[in-house]
Image (cartoon, helix red, strand yellow):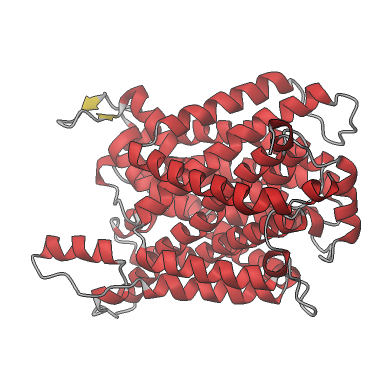
Amino acid sequence: MNLQQLFRKKPLAAYNDDIQTSQLKRTLGKWELTAIGVGAVIGGGIFVLTGVAANQYAGPALALSFILAGTGCLLAAFCYAEFASILPVSGSAYAYSYGTIGEFFAWFIGWNLILEYMMGATTVAVSWSKYFVKLLHLSGIQHIPAWLINDPFTAKEEALKLGIPPPSFSINLPAAIIVWAVTSILVRGIKESAKTNNIIVAVKVAAVLFVIAAGVAYINPLNWQPFIPERVVDPAGVSHYGISGVVTAAGLVFFAFIGFDAVSTQSQEAVNPTKDIPFAIITSLVICTTLYILVSLTLTGMTRYTDLDLGAPVASAFSGLGLNWASLLITIAAVIGLISVMLVMLLSQTRIFLNMAKDGLLPAKLFGAIHPHFKTPWKSTILLGFLSSVIAAFTPIEKATKMTSIGTLFAFAMICLAVLILRKTQPALHRPFRVKYLPVIALTGFVFNLLLMFSLDQSTWLRLLVWSFSGVLIYFLYSAKHSKLNKKE
């Protein structure tokens, strides 16, 4: 294979053929697409990460961290929106890159998107398990065997803290079960999945609005002073608070924004993709950023940032004020709401697999098989559910979170670069949604996401390199030979 073959591009006419021959049903309107975006974004980030980010890094200035992270995501969102209007096909950044930069780059993007969607769903499944166990405790069910609700690594750590021998076998059973429950919904069809998602999103947004409305009455302005705490460096050399702490917290809460790009994977199931996809991408991100800022201000106003719970900060802020009934309602909403995040993540991943299979880069009999009745890629959905359930059952949440973040940041950075290349190489191309000041927005988004990638630790980078190397091997051993573009040549 020569260098020219690595950069062969999928003709834009071929995308039109994909649209015409698609067996997927066009049933999603702009508000259903927006609900998918909101459903993917509001989840584990707001219910879990706010405690760690405020307590250890940003203090009351957590709101600024959300603004910073949201701004970086919004830059990428504009780039996604322009691409989605040009190429209204499923596949997200993978499909966009294939038509602009080339096959190898597109494969590399698609391979790393697995880290965003599959590992993202896995992370949320583990988070759901924690909230589910908390709900059981609040309901009076206290004695749950530790080996049934923890992965082996976490179970060992918990045993060492308690000074007891670690269990010989441990599995996070609730996390595995919820993944299979979501998988069964996805196999049945996109319309059914969308209806389920809409209901869950309504519950989740209502819970967030409840936190804001109910918490306002308990805000003590003194808890916001100082708004940006003085910078402190711990014995290990880690910086806390100050401006640097706000930036560090922005990198941490970035995980809370993962998922808005999932809207772009539903293009072939959208009624009017060229208009509705850009609308849904930007609208969902703006809605979620606004809610995040308001929730962070409410939480840090209700409770001193140093007293925020690291595991369940939203629920603990209310229980700390004696409002146990509110804590119970929030926990129930979290248990329900996190399901929609998993639903959207797994749904998006199967659509990317489907696109890659159509291009010949993955086996079509497995990843491109459409169910004759449900009209869904059922084989890849079941395979993805199996893999995600196994990973969720045996992987600590912090490792899955970091892998999700670095895969997403990479995709965001590359899509900012790709849309700029397309604007330069094909300026006359019809763009139903055209971003103003694109060079500034795209380059700023590229640099921003790249810098956040470099803020992650070395072990995460090592896992990314191993994952990427395995993807390169698969490309040269299988995908390059079976590519439809290769057959045409």
- 305 above or below 133? above
Q: What is the x, y in percent for residue 486? A: 78, 47
- Farthest left residue? 163
Taking depth in this image into account, of 489 and 31 the one nearest to the observer is: 489
Q: Going 43% across and 45% down the picture, which residue do you hit?
A: 466
Left or right of 431 on screen, residue 464: left
Q: What is the x, y in percent for residue 464? A: 45, 43
Q: What is the x, y in percent for residue 386? A: 52, 71
Q: What is the x, y in percent for residue 455? A: 40, 31
Left or right of 450 on screen, residue 418: right
Taking depth in this image into account, of 67 and 472 the one nearest to the observer is: 472
- 356 above or below 364? above
Residue 258 at least partly seen = no
Q: Going 34% across and 78% down the picture, which residue do you hit?
A: 139
Taking depth in this image into account, of 131 and 79 the one nearest to the observer is: 79
Picture quadrant where residue 146 is located = bottom left
Residue 435 at least partly seen = yes
Q: How many marks can you see?
A: 0
Q: Quadrant of the C terminus?
A: top right
Picture quadrant where residue 441 is located = top right
- 59 above or below 363? above
Q: Going 62% across and 33% down the picture, which residue do you hit?
A: 414
Q: Quadrant of the N terminus?
A: top right
